[in-house]
Amino acid sequence: MLAESTSDGKKIEIKIQAWEDREKTKADNKAERKLASTEVWKSTTKATLEAEVKKIDAGLEKLRLKEMEKVKNKEAETNKAVESKKASIEAKREQQKQRVEEKAAKHRSTNTIPTKCFGICND
């Protein structure tokens, strides 16, 4: 009977050991699935965030180009205004020179002295 109880004890111990190993394996497998799922979630989230960053960068680049275009347009408008003012000033200069030449020709033809001689004319 002692031998029988020892044999039964070994069988029970073997069954307990098998159950323990199976439960540990189930726990390990479950944990591995959850870890793998977490890694997939991490990778997906990382890819989504990287795509968002690229989208933001593209938006910033578009905004930068748009603002640069505005600055270039203002610069072109300024250059156009400067050229217009220069042309106006040159035209006035030529008109004044022409008026002076006409007055000088009139004084020469009438043999008169201009009223304002800037102190170089002797009366």
Image (spheres, rainbow, N blue to C red):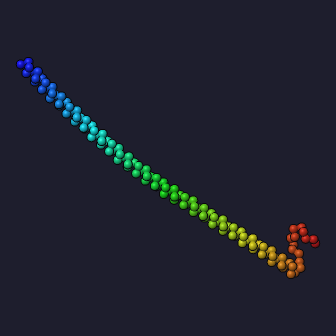
Q: Position of residue 13 (x, y in %)?
A: 15, 25
In the image shown, does 20 or 59 lie closer to the viewer?
Answer: 20
Q: As rendered, which of 53 and 122 lies closer to the eye?
A: 53
* Residue in the image at 17% along x and 31% along y: 19
**Spot occupied by residue 34 in the image (x, y as percentages of width and height):** 28, 40
Q: Tell me the residue at 69%/70% (across/down).
A: 88
**Which quarter of the figure has residue 113?**
bottom right
Q: Is residue 60 above or below residue 32?
A: below
Assign the C terminus to one quadrant of the image: bottom right
Residue sitting nearer the eye, 39 or 69: 39
Going 57% across and 63% down the picture, which residue do you hit? Answer: 73
Residue 23 drawn above or below residue 63? above
Residue 114 image position (x, y, % from top left): 87, 74
Residue 90: x %, y % from top left: 72, 70
Q: Is residue 30 left or right of residue 56?
A: left
Left or right placement of residue 25 versus residue 53 in this view: left
Q: How many marks?
A: 0
Q: Residue furthest bottom?
A: 109
Furthest residue in direction left, as rendered: 1
106 sits left or right of 52 in the view: right
- Is 82 located above or below residue 51 in the figure? below
Q: In this view, which residue lies farthest toward the right?
A: 123
Residue at screen point 89% across, 79% down: 111
Q: Quadrant of residue 82?
A: bottom right
Q: Quadrant of the N terminus?
A: top left
Residue farthest top in this picture: 2
